[in-house]
Each structure stands twice: as structure tokens, then as C-alpha cells.
Image: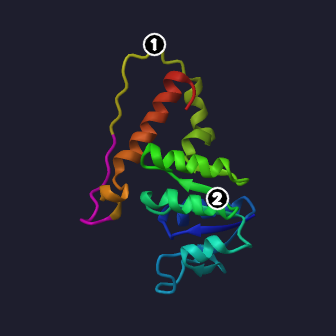
Amino acid sequence: MKFGILGEAKIAREYVVPAILAAGHEVTHVGRRNPGQVPLPSIYKDAIETDYDALLSEPSIDAIYNPLPNHLHVPYSIQALKLGKHVLCEKPVALNMNELKELESAAASSESFFYEAYMVRSHPQWAWLKELDIGEHQSSHFIFSYPDQPKGNIRNRKVDGGGPIIRHWLLCNIIRMYAIYRRP
């Protein structure tokens, strides 16, 4: 399978692209907001650098991975589905119910596969939690920390769906679902 990567996110470079390659697939294209300004990291080998729209329109690409900032997950994933691409999208796939319904509709009307890149649901390391007998649930407490980000960093801009709360709350919630209800 030939993959295109939307954006040049750290999670793509360090985790997802190595997994795609280890599974025997190819990364043939990398879409960037401003292509050509900085060389691609070596993990991308001979991938073609292009912009987002050209990547999505490339007929040789079978699937895309979308690690773009949160507010761009829905529009680019829908565009990819409409163009017949399979989509692996980073969490959260949507920022509200309207976006989620729009994305679900696009996925349902497409013959392509859509999946949220949420390793907790499918990684074998979490299987033990489903089997753990903790007795009757009384309360759940989660504590996490997030390093301070520079002012203006997209990860902290609410308008763009940034900030750690949505991602980490989702992680805490799915762990709670496994421990209490034995399902995500």
C-alpha cells in the first residue's frame, strides 16, 4: 500500500512512518503547508514533497495518514475519503458532534476505510486492562501533566482545537471504559 503523509508531525516521523514501513508499505508522498522550504527528514527517504491538496489528488496514493493540527482533521480526512483514499487520522478526529457527523457521513458514503489513530483501542499492551478484576468501581482519578508550550503554539490554541486536555481526557476516558466496562 502506498501512503501519503499530511504534514510533517513528530508523531509521524518517530512512530507512524516507521510502523508503516515495518509493515511493508511505502511512504511515497509528504504534504507540507509550505513545501520546499526545509529538506525532508531522512525517514521519508525518496518520498515526493508536495502540498496537501496535490498529495490528496495523487492517484498513486492508496491511503493517507493525517497528523495535522486538530482543526484540520475533518476537512482533510473528508477530502481524502471523497477522493477514494483510505484514512488513518490522529486523535481527536473531530472537535464537536457536527464535525463527527459530517465525517461519519463521508466515511459511510465512501468505499474507503477510515480509522482514528488511537493505539489504546488496538495495542496488545492494553489487553490486560480488559481482564483486570478491580472489583466494584467506586471512583476514577487521573493525573497527567503537559510541558508548558511557547506562547502561540498551535497545541495550545483553543480556536484550532489545540491543548492537551482533549487528547489526554480521551486517553483517560478510554482507560476508564476498559477498566470498568471492559470495552472502549
Q: Residue at x 45, y 40 (%)?
A: 171
Residue 151 is inside the magenta segment: yes
Q: Residue at x 48, y 33 (%)?
A: 175
Tell which of 91 and 134 is nearer to you. Answer: 91
Q: Residue at x 46, y 61 (%)?
A: 72
Q: Which secondary structure class fits the magenta region best?
A: loop
Mark 1 is surrounded, within 10 Å at the Cα level, by few (under 14), some (14 to 19) or many (20 or more) other residues, namely few
Residue 43 is inside the magenta segment: no
Q: Find the magenta span and give its range.
A: 144-153
Q: Which mark is residue 136?
A: 1
> As drawn, is 76 to the left or to the right of 18?
left
Residue 42, position in %: x, y?
58, 77
- Work out whether 32 lies above or below 156: below
Label 2 belongs to which residue?
A: 81
The amino acid beneath tag 2 is Leu
Element type where label 1 sits in the image: loop
The amino acid beneath tag 1 is Glu
Decide if residue 19 is in sight here: no
Of the residues under marks 2 and 1, which one precedes in the sequence? 2
Element type where label 2 sits in the image: helix
Number of labels in the image equals 2
Residue at the bottom extreme of this rendering: 36
Q: Quadrant of the N terminus?
A: bottom right
- Work out whether 160 lies above or below 146: below
Q: CA distance from mark 2 to mark 1?
A: 43 Å
Is label 2 or label 1 in front? 2
Tell which of 134 and 97 is nearer to you. Answer: 97
Residue 58, position in %: x, y?
68, 75
